[in-house]
Image: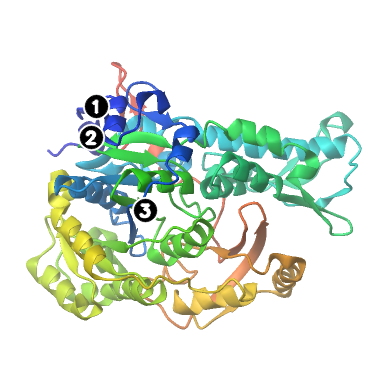
Amino acid sequence: MPLSDIEIAQAAKMQRITKVAEKLGIPEDQLVPYGHYKAKISLDYVDSLAKKKDGKLILVTAISPTPAGEGKTTTTVGLGDALNKIGKKAVICLREPSLGPVFGVKGGAAGGGYAQVVPMEDINLHFTGDFNAIGLANNLLAAAIDNHIHHGNALGIDVRRIAWKRVMDMNDRALRDITVGLGGPGNGYPRQDGFDIVVASEVMAIFCLSNSLKDLKTRLGNIVVAYTRELKPVLAKDLKVHGAMTVLLKDALQPNLVQTLENNAAFIHGGPFANIAHGCNSVIATKTALKLADYVVTEAGFGADLGAEKFVDIKCRKSGLRPSAVVIVATVRALKYHGGVDLKELSKENLAALEKGIANLERHVNNVRNHFGLPCVVSINQFTFDTAAEIELLKKKMAHHEAPVILAKHWAEGGAGAAEVAHAVVDLIEKVPTNFKFVYEDSLPLWDKVKTIATKIYGAADITADSKVRAQIKKLQEDGYGHYPVCIAKTQYSFSTDPQLRAAPSGHMINIREVRLSAGAEFIVMVCGDVMTMPGLPKVPSAEKIDLTDDGKVVGLF
């Protein structure tokens, strides 16, 4: 019986983190150790790298996710190991897992098989406390709002127009809509409130996009928390707590250094997607890695329509980062699922369903190549029951897309199993120039930005919104926020807002349900369809399988 992910991780021969850092040229006195196998890197050292030449950035993205799994993080880790194995100096940059999904649907997010980052249990649980710091900073601001109102409300906050929610790093549907302040005058003023998951918060987005502590403090101060009766915005700096929020985040902003199973360096820093934040490693960590390696492999959340689009239109726009190549991850199983096959039938050969499902991959490749202007390869995570006929059909169908299809076996073989992908990516970077472009220009009105993404990237016919939402978008435009990029929150399972519409639906409508201003992060969130920013737990959450044995070993994190 094959070993589980956690069994493989627990058997790993880890190196002291000082040794991992040494291979990158990081002095020991610039590390802030968290035990023997993880450390933060001081911001002073990060700043000292500013004049060093940047390496090449490789973005790993995927087809639209399915319950069958694609293996995007596994590929990111496997490719990083493979690049080191073929003689290149490479570093991996990943986001930190969120405890809500870990105990909910995922069970872990540190890669899989023999392509993992370790220590796996630490990474999937509290790690270095970054998410706790982000949650505390967010909730300090929430407490300051209600406290200000309780003590006379000098700023004239309209309690009906408070835009700031509390957060926690757990899936809990009961907290989406709640009432606070009950129990009499001593407990403040009763009002409707709610919780988001930590990774959906604006503080997380700000954390990921900040270039320095100074930038972080400025962005936190610019958060719009509420409005007055005259519709004048009230900012976090008006409540005078943005300095204290920065204090809570000062250590968290230092990038986290860990290692792969093959003892290669990995930076894990910043939050996952959660339908709001931009879905990838922090700007600080990515930029630091680029100064320390010739190649940096990073990942964007969900499929290329969401994660890669935000990587390009938000992260790259704000940071100046530019990828040199893209890897799109897929599996034959997932493509058959997109072709309409039931989850239980995916192990059987089905060429007709595969051909239908390949449409999903084709659209993602087209988006990356033509709308982002980036060369790409397709990495197929191979399963034992993938048939020769299925592989042949996939390669044949994709041949005219100028995106080489390569089979990868890093899940079973580690870096050696992704060597072919590594060679292809290096070849791509050396021979194929990029024509990097944003999907839309800053000057385009907010409504048209959403429409451009919907029609170009999602294959939609148009976008819709009720009169209230349209009025909100119009007001944000008039108030001077029109130059901001848009961050679209929608289901990850489809190009549409209906998770049941698989493959590559076209001609659908994208409905904007809600609009949120993130003035600190400097983008406008457009919530589309039924997507939730506080997820619920499934009927059988992963938490039921996670346990501690009598000898102190964690089990069930897979």
* Other-residue count near label 3 (Cα within 10 Å), few / some / many at <14 / 14–19 / ≥20: many
Which disc number belongs to residue 256? none
Residue 325 shows up from this direction: yes
Residue shown at 37% from the left, 30% from the top: 122
Q: List x then y, in percent, for residue 335.
A: 26, 67
Q: List x then y, in percent, for residue 527.
A: 59, 63
> Helix, strand, or loop for circle 1?
loop
* Other-residue count near label 1 (Cα within 10 Å), few / some / many at <14 / 14–19 / ≥20: some
- Three-letter code, disc 2: Asn
Looking at the image, is mark 1 or mark 3 nearer the viewer?
Answer: 1
- Dividing the picture into quadrants, the one containing residue 393 is bottom left
Earlier sequence position, callout 1 versus callout 3 = 1
Relative depth, front residue between 249 and 71: 249
- Dividing the picture into quadrants, the one containing residue 67 is bottom left
Could you tell me which quadrant the N terminus lies in? Answer: top left
Up-down relation of residue 33 to residue 80 (above or below): above
Task: Give the Cα separation between the discs numbered 3 and 2.
Answer: 19 Å
Q: How many marks?
A: 3
Mark 1–mark 2 contact, CB under 8 Å?
yes
> Helix, strand, or loop for circle 2?
loop
Residue 346 shows up from this direction: no
Up-down relation of residue 191 to residue 511 (above or below): above
Which disc number belongs to residue 263? 2
Q: Which residue is mark 3?
A: 299
Please state if 558 lies on the left or on the right of 13 as rendered: right
Residue shown at 28% from the left, 53% from the top: 71
Q: Which residue is mark 1?
A: 15
